[in-house]
Amino acid sequence: MTIATIIPAGYYEGMIEKELQEIEKLIRERIREMETSLAYLKEETKAIEPSVSLGRLTRMEAISEKGVNEYVLAGNKLTLEKLNNALDRITKGIYGRCIRCGGEIPIGRLRLVPEALVCVPCSSGKK
């Protein structure tokens, strides 16, 4: 299902439908990238078997690398959740609105951070 089938023409005030479709496409691409990355990271964060013959330093390096991968995996899961929430907000017709002040989030910010929930002034505490 795409934005064109969900949101009636002219629904968004400031953001034109073409921009909204561009952002939706970007979000879907990032979701695919995250899902690919998650599959790899899940494999890389599996427990290191004690039976695997590694030297002491190599085992320590493997444990350290596993820790880094677990950190990245957690961040990617969170980003994936935020991107899916952004798609949900598009469907509900509330995407691109700041959840704090209700103002419009500039398209430039949404292109860079499509999962953004707040405008720049609210994000920096200037409002």
Image: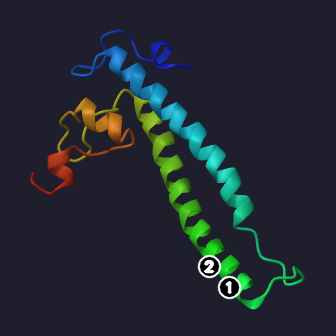
Residue type at tag 1: Met
In this view, the residue farthest toward the right is 51
Whether pointer 1 and pointer 2 mark residues with C-beta atoms closer than 8 Å, the reply is yes
Kindly state the secondary structure of the residue where label 2 is placed: helix
Question: What is the quadrant of residue 86 in the picture?
Answer: top left
Task: Locate the N terminus by quadrant.
Answer: top right
Q: Position of residue 28 (x, y in %)?
A: 53, 32
User: Residue at (70%, 59%) from the top-left corner?
Assistant: 42
Kindly state the secondary structure of the residue where label 1 is placed: helix
Neighbor class of circle 2 (other Cα within 10 Å; few <14, some 14-19, many 20+) is few
Q: Where is residue 16 in the image (x, y as percent from the top left)?
A: 29, 16
Neighbor class of circle 1 (other Cα within 10 Å; few <14, some 14-19, many 20+) is few
Q: Name the residue under label 2.
A: 64
The mark found on residue 111 in the picture is none
Residue type at tag 2: Ser
Question: What is the quadrant of residue 94 in the picture?
Answer: top left
In this view, the residue farthest toward the bottom is 56
Task: Check the image and report above or below for 35 versus 92.
Answer: below
Q: Name the residue under label 1.
A: 60
Residue 94 or 75: which is nearer the viewer?
A: 75
In this view, the residue farthest toward the left is 126
User: Residue at (45%, 27%) from the top-left corner?
Assistant: 24
Q: How far apart are marks 1 and 2 (CA)?
A: 6 Å
User: Residue at (66%, 58%) from the top-left corner?
Assistant: 41
Q: Where is residue 127 in the image (x, y as percent from the top left)?
A: 9, 51
Residue 71 or 102: which is nearer the viewer?
A: 71
